[in-house]
Amino acid sequence: MADSKTGDTETAELETFRAETRAWLEANCPPEMRKPATSDADVFWGGRNAKFSSEPQRIWFERMRDKGWTVPDWPREYGGGGLSPAEHKVLRAEMGRIGARPPLSSFGIWMLGPALLKYGNEAQKKEHLPKIAAGEIRWCQGYSEPNAGSDLASLQTRAESDGDDFVITGSKIWTSYANYADWIFCLVRTDPTAKKHDGISFILFDMTSKGVTTKPILLISGYSPFCETFFDGVRVPKSHVVGTVNRGWDVAKYLLQHERAMISGMGERGVGRPLGQIAADSVGTDAQGKLDDAMLRGKIATFDVDEAALAACAERAVDLAKAGQAHPAFSSAMKYYGTELNKRRYEILMSAGGVDALEWESERSKQGARPRAWLRTKANSIEGGTTEVMLGIVAKRILDLPGA
Amino acid sequence: MALVLTEEQSMLRDSARGLISDKAPVSHLRHLRDAKDPTGFSKELWHSFAEMGFAGLLVPEEFGGSGLGYVEAGVVMEEIGRTLMPSPFLATSVVAASALARGGNAAQKSEHLPKIASGSLLATLAIDEGAKHRPLQTSLQAVRAGNGFKLSGAKALVVDGHVADLLIVAARTAGAAGERNGLTLFLVNPKAKGVAIERTIMVDAHNAARIELANVEVDADSVLGEVDQGAALLDGVLDIGRGAVAAEMVGLSDEVFGRTVEYLKSRKQFGKLIGEFQALQHRAAELYVDIEITRAATMKALQALDADVAKAAPSVAVAKARAGTTATRAVQEGVQMHGGMGMTDQFDIGFFMKRARVCEELFGDANYHTEQLARARGY
């Protein structure tokens, strides 16, 4: 049903690309990489100190990197695959078809990259983007502070001008994997006299710089994915500011849209076994093959309806963006729904698992993988902007409701 | 296929919206209800629908129709949902036209489809028998008699049943209630001996009827599709109807929501616009997201129907289930946020609540479709 001759040619080219991609993935994606990672240790994050957890992980990463498909839609000159939005959609669909996992997980890919592509100067793009694409540098995000959470723009970490440098003093909190990261993208106050949104700059620096220390925070999951990060007179060249000095809030907000899209995606892991079948393992089934817990079955089915509908909405959001019809605040809507849905998924998994899902330290439970993951999801509706902040953004920016 | 309307589909939406908002705003439904209009819709408007090619939207071009797809039918249904326009479009142009086009033999198609496209034939599917939509529970009996069959039993919620020129009746020719095997669809003349039709005035003031068949004789030519093998045909036709009703519910939800948000921006209490209150802002934002997700799920289902009706069932179940819960929430919040005004008959919002309740029952409610998805996924 193509609407014109060009449409037909485009469709034909896309189908060729699909066939080639399918064949390449079949030949190059190791079988071990065709299922979701079972733990965070099984995810490849890259960086100076990166280690592969398995040989298939290394092979898969290197093959994808060599094609530029760690970042398929970035320009080739920056280490990307140079794919069009339509081709990127095809690649995602083909990877999804065989359950291929992403070869590289990275805040550089999900958050900093898009912001650099839009706001970075040529030198910054050339310096940083290829290293992100190649998994050479692992980034962390210096946004929240002890007294600046939902009210992020009230942040107080200060950067004082000293010749060609800024000297940075203050602290950040909830810095994901700061203790493993090589570089940080950081919001700092460069003008303490301006209104709170107007005195912020977005700056990049090496975590091995003198004066940087990190301290992991033990969470209810028993893991420490987040850190407190302290800056004591850290000297950073002014050329490391992305965008204009004191206009960092624009960069910060743009990056947040990508962060929210990333987090909302956590709720749509439609691959793998259906929730209802996972539940059947522990709950059992009746003579007709129905889950032996009617209320749980109903909750799972309702969840499945909502998850499928959200997946359609995520697909539509991409299509709307491509058509230039997307509302810039829509990622907040998706973030709210995706994270609440992911919390529901894990409440169901805990309920389905019963006693078996309560073990914390056994081999049998893979060191409490399920209860720890369940507890981890509680952060989804807090990190990257709380559900309440997201709903406020939808109300004001999309619905144009009045008030502060 | 992208989940956005193409340029042609947007143009179709604009022309449907133009006609419907101009000729059939909610006051049109109110007038038909208050006048106890015997037809239940405007024949003049139906004539316009036919002239614009909507009546035969799904009818193949060789039978005088527009030969468009289910996404396009959904576009028109969404606009119908915005003003609650009573129209034979759903029963005749979507459900009956699909049944005839998909299940009819050459003679049946060439006899009926051109008349549907020209707007001169009204047709409807008679499926439900009990209080809830349970197609496999069909027990209206069709027993062989001479060269044909004799039909006996009762149907409810037959949309446009009292004005239809042609009934498509789901009957049991073999097997027991609950079985897939043994279902057969029949084309029945509503004026045939033994057919009793009672118009039922419904909560939403849209057309519906109860129909009783007492030894109604039909000949063998009136079988639509294969004897005993009607379940597959019925599945497809019902899924098409479900996708269309889901689209109507998206339009209805969106309209109620738009009116409610406008009210939040104009109503003052405690010296403030009530839309400034965070309690209401967050509920409005949640409802917005619900509607957007449901809109996407519905487009997905309609595209799946266009791609292959036989494989669309899971997408359709998701869409109709979501449409049910979202529309229910939209009308409830609509009435609540309009306060006392929302409870008055003079105000339009109640019409939306009533229609949403009927749409929820039409072709299976959210519970029914959620159950279908669970079965499809094997748990």
Image (tube, coloured by chain):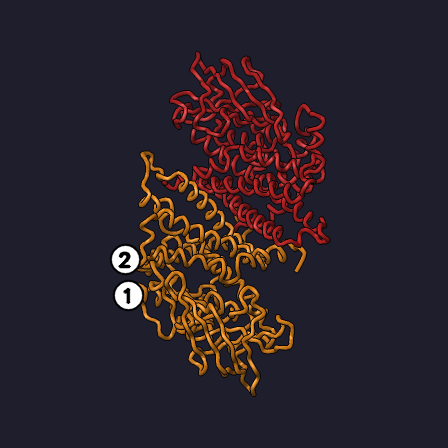
Chain colours: A orange, B red
Q: Secondary structure at mark 2?
A: loop
Q: Which residue is mark 1?
A: A55
| Coordinates of residue B37 in the picture (x, y in percent) | 69, 25
Q: What residue sits 43% from the left and 31% below the top?
A: B232
| Coordinates of residue B65 in the picture (x, y in percent) | 58, 34
Q: Secondary structure at mark 1?
A: helix
- The label on residue B176 is none
In-front residue for pair A325/A351: A351
| Coordinates of residue A182 in the picture (x, y in percent) | 42, 75
| Coordinates of residue B118 in the picture (x, y in percent) | 63, 30
Q: Which callout, 2 or 1, points at the residue further toward the start of the chain?
A: 1
Q: Label 2 is placed on what type of residue?
A: Ser
Vertical order, A116 against A347 (above or below)? below
Count neighbours of disc 2 (C-alpha within 10 A) and say few if under 14, some if 14 to 19, many if 20 or more: few
Q: What residue sits 38% from the left and 49% below the top?
A: A349
Vertical order, B142 against A72 (above or below)? above
Chain of the residue displaying label 1: A
Q: CA distance from mark 2 to mark 1?
A: 26 Å
- The image shows a total of numbered marks equal to 2
Vertical order, A172 against B160 (above or below)? below
Asked if one can make out residue A174 in the rendered structure from this viewpoint, the answer is yes
Q: Label 1 is placed on what type of residue?
A: Glu
Asked if one can make out residue A321 in the rendered structure from this viewpoint, the answer is no
Q: Nearer the viewer, mark 2 or mark 1?
A: 2
Circles 2 and 1: CB distance less than 8 Å? no
Residue most toward the front? B270
Q: Which residue is mark 2?
A: A362
Q: Are marks 2 and 1 on the same chain?
A: yes
Q: Residue A292: name its quadrant.
A: top left
